[in-house]
Image: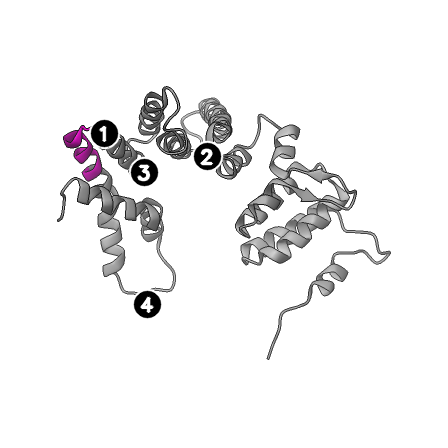
Amino acid sequence: MSVGPCPCQYTRNVTKKNGAPLPTRALGSQTEECMDNFDFPMAKMFCQRALDIEPTNLTILDMLGNICAELGDMDKAKQISFPAGWPVYVFLKAVELSPEEGHGKYMYLGQIHTGMEAVQYFSKGIEVMLNIIDKQAQEASDMGAAAMPPEPCVSAKDVSVAFCSIAEIFFTDLCMEEGASERCKEAIEKALHYDQNNPEALQLMASYLFSSEKTEEGRNYLIKSVSSWLPSLQKEEESPASAEQPDEEEEEAQTVIPPYESRITTAKLLIEAEEFE
């Protein structure tokens, strides 16, 4: 029976001949390679080694937080113990080092926390994303119409998804707070402003309207939400299962189809709206 290389072999490979650790960049590359291969335990080992060398490296801190989240260890995603003995809150440390750059850490912190604290993290992440979008637009304008604009690192859809996260919190955890209904609706409207075809935002608006006893309006939003992704799902189910590599059209369709849990909610709402076909 064949087995993969043991961690000690990797440890030997990441040291120089004189026994000194390789630079942080090399360890970061090893970490990314393991993440690409979904070997998150090994990626975590490389990441922690890199932080032994450079404990305040923002990129490595973000990577370690993401790895812990992928491993389902959300407590360690918030707090990692280092050899020096002092606890480092990975994402919070990244916020401390660079509060106005990198929205991803705020999105993860929003997922890790609950209630108003989560809202604050998502809101800050949205602020960072909007600044990035403004910067991207300015750079594209400076380059001129003839130049090929670079691939945007943040899109309006990303902002829309973040507003959906805020809306869900006011719809659930903070539903009893004063003004929760208004803030929930405001977040949904902003989500639709940045992406009017976002099925999650459309479905949230339907839920909100149903809860406000505006059934007919809610039904219209729900049907629009389902219409935005159901044809893609049906096409995927009808396509041959033997295709090894999905083409670009299929990959794009995958990004449109909501996750399974969201589709369960869709089914419940359709029953509530008496839409059985």
Report the span colored magenta: 211-223
Q: Position of residue 19 (x, y in %)?
A: 84, 56
Circle 3 Cα neighbour tier, 10 Å, few/some/many (<14 / 14–19 / ≥20):
many
> Which secondary structure, mark 2?
loop
Mark 1 touching mark 2, by CB under 8 A?
no
Residue contact at pointers 2 and 3, CB within 8 angstroms: no
Mark 1 residue type: Leu
> Which residue position holds label 4?
242
Nearer to us of marks 1 and 2 is: 1
Q: Which residue is mark 2?
A: 152
Nearest to viewer (mark 2 / mark 4): 4
Query: From what the image shows, is residue 58 above or below residue 71?
Result: above
Q: In the rendering, which numbered label is found on residue 209?
A: 1
Number of callouts in the render?
Answer: 4
Q: Depth check: give the residue in front, 249 or 3.
A: 3
Q: Which of the pair 137/82 is nearer the observer?
A: 82
Q: Nearer the viewer, mark 2 or mark 3?
A: 3
Q: In the image, is residue 246 part of the stretch drawn in magenta?
A: no
